[in-house]
Image: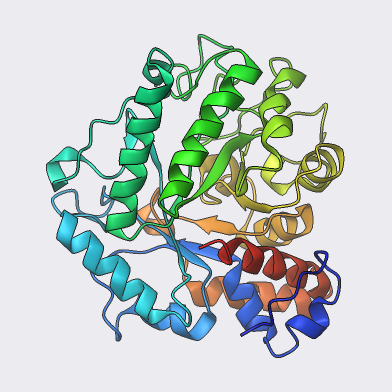
């Protein structure tokens, strides 16, 4: 356990967390997906949470290996049981248990599993009055809380500025074109989640609304489409946001070499130094095609950590043939530290940010 002393991030962390091993700090930086509707003490995921001090897990309903079976979510009671088991695997009941629950097409807690499952997409939410929106999102947060989910990878603050965009515009995932309006709706979403102790994540930095391609499938270049207005919701919400999720979009005007997730110019430079965000940065799934088709695992981990990302997300969802174990992730990062390619200080700062985030739970 660490002493609850208010210090600046990176300051005195050696004193506060001196008794935490490098491996345990690395473990806190990892959020992984796994197959299973339960997490008994002898299960692989439970052993990994215990051994490596994993920071979080991400849950999915769709099973990419066997479509006839659920991956993690089958029924209301089952999910509540799973999350309880997962928390029991950890040390302090503060394992981050995440889902994507935006509303519309993107909601993991579906009606067919016994959940409400009819939360509206963002483009329909904007047609509602404020009291309806508050009621809707509070209902969503209550359902998450009852299920044992404490981290919602939402809201989307991408601007709806490209009608050819299939991922954001096409699915109605944006609150609109106006940055201030988007920030207002996102703020209401965050408030509703907080009413039931659910953490949130603004996504997808530095903006996915102008894109044409899908980063799930491959390289997406927004250089000639992206506008600075896409940063505005992050600036407006920088002191309110629990976390920010970084996208895999490439913009050579920000970084001529790396996509946003792997770019120190984007994360440490633009998001932290220029916009002033001090909280936890989480990557989008690092197994998406935009990353996996171009970089090997060791390069991905080195670049992401050095870019300033705190939580590294590996969903083990997109390609059943390319699942990665917690052991491989931890061992690879330890090797990077040993080789001097990643500093202990960088890992210490990420660890400290994550502990401050978890104090809110």
Q: Position of residue 35 (x, y in %)?
A: 30, 64
Q: As rendered, which of 205 and 111 lies closer to the eye?
A: 111
**Which residue lies at the image location 64% right of the left edge and 33% below the top edge?**
249
235 relative position to 10: left or right? left
For the N terminus, give its image quadrant: bottom right
Q: As rendered, which of 33 and 351 lies closer to the eye?
A: 351
Q: As rendered, which of 207 and 213 lies closer to the eye?
A: 207
214 relative position to 85: left or right? right
Q: Position of residue 211 (x, y in %)?
A: 59, 21
**Which residue lies at the image location 55% right of the left edge and 44% below the top edge?**
201
351 relative position to 228: left or right? left
Residue 250 visible in the snapshot:
no
Q: Give the number of callouts.
A: 0
User: Looking at the rendering, which quadrant does residue 230 occupy?
Assistant: top right
Q: Is residue 340 above or below residue 350?
A: below
Q: As rendered, which of 41 and 34 lies closer to the eye?
A: 41
| Residue at the extreme front | 131
Q: Position of residue 317 (x, y in %)?
A: 38, 52
**Which residue lies at the image location 45% right of the left edge and 77% below the top edge?**
49
237 relative position to 119: left or right? right
**Which residue lies at the image location 61% right of the left edge and 29% below the top edge?**
220
Q: Position of residue 174 (x, y in %)?
A: 49, 22
């Amino acid at each position: 356990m660490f002493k609850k002393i208010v210090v600046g991030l990176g300051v005195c962390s050696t004193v506060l967390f001196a008794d935490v091993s490098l491996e345990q700090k690395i473990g806190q930086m990892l959020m992984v997906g796994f197959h299973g509707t339960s997490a008994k003490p002898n299960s692989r995921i439970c052993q990994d949470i215990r051994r490596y001090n994993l920071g979080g897990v991400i849950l999915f309903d769709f099973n990419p290996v066997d479509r006839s079976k659920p991956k993690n979510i089958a029924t209301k009671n089952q999910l509540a049981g799973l999350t309880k088991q997962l928390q029991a695997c950890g040390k302090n009941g503060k394992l981050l248990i995440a889902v994507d629950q935006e509303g519309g097409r993107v909601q993991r807690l579906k009606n067919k599993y016994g959940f409400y499952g009819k939360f509206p997409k963002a483009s329909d939410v904007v047609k509602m009055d404020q009291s309806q929106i508050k009621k809707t999102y509070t209902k969503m947060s209550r359902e998450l809380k009852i299920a044992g989910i404490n981290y919602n990878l939402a809201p989307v603050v991408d601007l709806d500025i490209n009608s050819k965009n299939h991922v954001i515009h096409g699915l109605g995932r944006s609150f609109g074109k106006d940055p201030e309006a988007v920030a207002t709706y996102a703020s209401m979403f965050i408030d509703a989640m907080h009413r039931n102790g659910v953490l949130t994540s603004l996504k997808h930095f530095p903006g996915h609304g102008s894109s044409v391609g899908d980063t799930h499938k491959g390289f997406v270049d927004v250089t000639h489409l992206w506008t600075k207005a896409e940063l505005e919701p992050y600036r407006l919400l920088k002191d309110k946001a629990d976390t920010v999720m970084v996208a895999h979009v490439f913009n050579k005007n920000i970084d001529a070499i790396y996509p946003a997730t792997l770019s120190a110019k984007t994360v440490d430079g633009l998001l932290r130094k220029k916009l002033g965000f001090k909280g936890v940065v989480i990557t989008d799934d690092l197994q998406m095609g935009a990353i996996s088709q171009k970089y090997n695992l060791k390069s991905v981990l080195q670049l992401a950590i050095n870019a300033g990302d705190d939580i590294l997300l590996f969903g083990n969802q997109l390609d059943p043939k390319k699942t990665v174990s917690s052991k491989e992730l931890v061992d690879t990062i330890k090797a990077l530290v040993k080789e001097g390619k990643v500093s202990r200080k960088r890992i210490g700062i990420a660890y400290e940010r994550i502990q401050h985030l978890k104090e809110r739970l």
